[in-house]
Image (tube, rainbow, N blue to C red):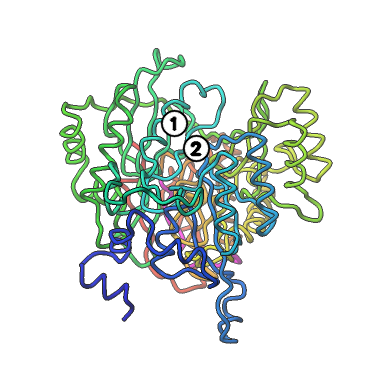
């Protein structure tokens, strides 16, 4: 029995809880291990690294071969820069680009508007994190059991309205510990650890990660219902830029675990309408309620969504009202939601699809080089990471957009009009070979998956349908497959679960229609569905693919599918009461 297991059995808490409690505010043994000669960190240290924006990983492409030769695993780290609202300058972009030279030569945009560096070696870790901060960015709280990077719609028309609340949220929930600065920035120790405290998080921080997103009314580009707390402004007369308050949604979260039916994706529930000056206080009260009452024994059921389902939304409201000192007004109705992708051009913006968010140079496509040139020449200066792993260039008029397009095409980079809608709207998590949670491939096989879907759509005469495809290599849902029109979630090394019926606007969960499907089966499984969808289109239906699938219903959909060739490991999961955002 390991030391961590023994400690967990002794305290009755998940082992991560003991690591946090004994860490001296996220220090643990990190200082010594960062300077040590070993190629990897110890178990407790890997838990604490996450709070500093770092995951220890190993190259899983060579894991089996190295294990067979009794060699140590090929360890490296993923470093994640938290980028609130995805906003970057040209200088910061160039700083990240230079850091990529010291890793695997790529940058990875995330579905939460951050930027990741992969294959960071342990001896380089401290300097790379230091240099990220020198560029005006931070990795603190990009991972770990804290409030993560605050997402928000990147549309510049909403800057004056969204930036203040995003910055206040970031400031309120940034961990207070000086450990990050000691370890990675200036090396100076705090004067007295006895005086150091975490006013929001306490000594053991949160039971699990906590995600906050701020949407703009009607534009659900951030998948607001998938967050632990979603914030949606209400506008004067329903349309002006004057914010009258906010609807606060709670309990969203998409992660689940294979063979644990008590884990599941859930959409956020409206909690209350909140006046502008109180929204951050109310969010803090939700966070501290989760801190005090969330599950610290079973990390698979430690998210806010499970606390709400166990105790009820009225219980949570009463907890928040007690902390606030008064009753909360009920939530008001929200505007109809529409999908947002921020592709294409407006008078002063230009959106660029980035396949799976990977900024890299290949033989025919030199995306990283093109972006470096654009930033160096200041053709782009206000750069925003979108929630679908793409880029939005802001403050670029038509002549500049033309110059940007020329540079991109000179480097083989496809513009939105150059690719099919389904390819533009497809995203995947990194999965193998870096992610330790991955059960199978995602990013590396997504192009082939899209090839299959494109061919099906073309065969049935609906090649221009804008269908969203989200793919992950495990059930944790980082690329949000459960709200997508077509969701593909890794179950084993070679098989996936297929979900249909989510909406393009992210307001309904898809339903699992096939479990343990190999990617070779995708054509035969989706074929009958696409065929009937195309027939409905020819008969005058205007519904998007996800809406149409939901209207058909799971019983009818599954009756069209061929018999599975791989043993099914469970019945289709239906959570009808939780399917649609309220």
The answer to whether residue 291 of the structure is visible from this angle is yes
Label 1: how many Cα within 10 Å (few below 14, some 14–19, many 20+): few
Looking at this rendering, what residue extends furthest in the bottom direction?
Answer: 69
Secondary element type, mark 2: helix
The vertical placement of 145 against 433, above or below, is: above
Quadrant of the image for the C terminus? top left
Position of residue 489 in the picture relative to residue 255 (left or right): right
The residue under label 1 is 167
Residue at the extreme front of the image, as rendered:
191
Name the residue beneath numbered marker 2. 84
Closer to us: 7 or 415: 7
Callout 1: helix, strand or loop? helix
Residue located 66% across and 24% down the image: 395
- Which residue is found at the position 61% from the left and 41% from the top? 390
Q: Which of 539 and 63 is in front in this view?
A: 63
Q: What residue is shown at x 52% (from left), y 61% (from top)?
A: 473
Along the viewing direction, whichever of 417 and 38 lies nearer the viewer: 38
Residues in magenta? 509-520
Report the Cα–Cα distance between label 1 and label 2: 8 Å
Look at the image and say whether residue 142 sits in the magenta stretch.
no
The structure residue drawn at horizontal position 50% and vertical position 32%, both measured from the top left corner, is 153
Q: First in sequence: mark 1 or mark 2?
A: 2
């Amino acid at each position: 029995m390991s030391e961590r297991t023994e400690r967990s059995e002794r305290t009755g808490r998940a082992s991560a809880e003991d690591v946090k409690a004994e860490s001296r505010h996220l220090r643990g043994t990190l200082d010594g291990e960062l300077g040590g000669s070993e190629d990897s960190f110890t178990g407790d240290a890997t838990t604490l690294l996450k709070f500093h924006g770092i995951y220890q990983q190993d190259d899983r492409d060579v894991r089996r071969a190295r294990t067979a030769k009794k060699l140590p695993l090929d360890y490296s780290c993923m470093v994640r820069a938290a980028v609130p609202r995805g906003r970057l300058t040209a200088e910061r972009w160039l700083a990240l680009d230079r850091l990529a030279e010291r890793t695997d030569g790529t940058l990875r945009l995330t579905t939460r508007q951050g930027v990741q560096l992969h294959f960071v070696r342990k001896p380089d870790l401290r300097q790379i994190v230091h240099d990220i901060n020198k560029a005006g960015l931070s990795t603190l709280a990009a991972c770990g059991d804290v409030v993560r990077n605050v997402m928000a719609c990147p549309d510049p028309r909403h800057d004056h309205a969204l930036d203040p609340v995003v910055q206040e949220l970031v400031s309120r929930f940034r961990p207070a510990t000086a450990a990050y600065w000691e370890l990675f920035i200036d090396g100076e120790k705090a004067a007295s650890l006895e005086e150091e405290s975490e006013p929001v998080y306490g000594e053991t921080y949160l039971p699990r990660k906590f995600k906050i997103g701020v949407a703009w009314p009607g534009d659900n580009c951030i998948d607001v219902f998938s967050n632990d707390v979603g914030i949606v402004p209400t506008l004067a007369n329903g349309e002006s830029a004057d914010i009258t308050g906010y609807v606060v949604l709670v309990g969203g979260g998409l992660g689940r675990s294979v063979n644990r039916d008590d884990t599941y994706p859930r959409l956020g529930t409206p909690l209350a309408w909140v006046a502008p000056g109180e929204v951050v206080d109310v969010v803090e009260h939700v966070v501290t309620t989760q801190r005090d009452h969330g599950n610290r024994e079973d990390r698979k059921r430690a998210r806010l969504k499970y606390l709400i389902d166990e105790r009820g939304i009225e219980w949570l409201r009463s907890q928040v009202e007690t902390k606030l000192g008064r009753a909360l007004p009920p939530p008001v109705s929200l505007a109809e939601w529409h999908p947002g992708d921020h592709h294409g051009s407006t008078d002063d913006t230009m959106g660029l699809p980035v396949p799976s968010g990977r900024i890299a140079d290949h033989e025919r496509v030199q995306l990283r080089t093109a972006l470096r040139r654009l930033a160096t020449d200041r053709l782009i200066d206000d750069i925003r990471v979108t929630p679908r792993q793409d880029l939005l260039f802001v403050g670029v008029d038509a002549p500049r957009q033309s110059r940007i397009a020329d540079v991109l095409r000179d480097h083989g980079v496809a513009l939105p009009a150059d690719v099919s809608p389904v390819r533009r709207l497809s995203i995947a998590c990194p999965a193998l070979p870096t992610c330790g949670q991955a059960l199978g491939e995602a990013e590396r096989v997504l192009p082939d998956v899209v090839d299959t879907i494109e061919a099906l759509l073309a065969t049935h005469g609906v090649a221009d349908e804008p269908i969203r495809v989200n793919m992950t290599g495990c059930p944790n849902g980082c690329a949000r497959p459960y709200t997508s029109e077509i969701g593909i979630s890794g179950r084993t090394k070679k098989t996936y679960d297929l979900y249909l019926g989510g909406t393009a606007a992210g307001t309904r969960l898809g339903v699992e229609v096939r479990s343990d499907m190999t990617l070779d089966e995708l054509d035969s499984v989706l074929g009958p569905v696409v065929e009937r969808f195309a027939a409905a289109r020819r008969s005058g239906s205007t519904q998007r693919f996800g809406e149409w699938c939901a209207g058909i219903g799971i019983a009818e959909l599954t009756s069209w599918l061929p018999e599975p060739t791989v043993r099914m490991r469970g019945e289709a999961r239906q959570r009808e009461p939780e399917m649609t955002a309220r």
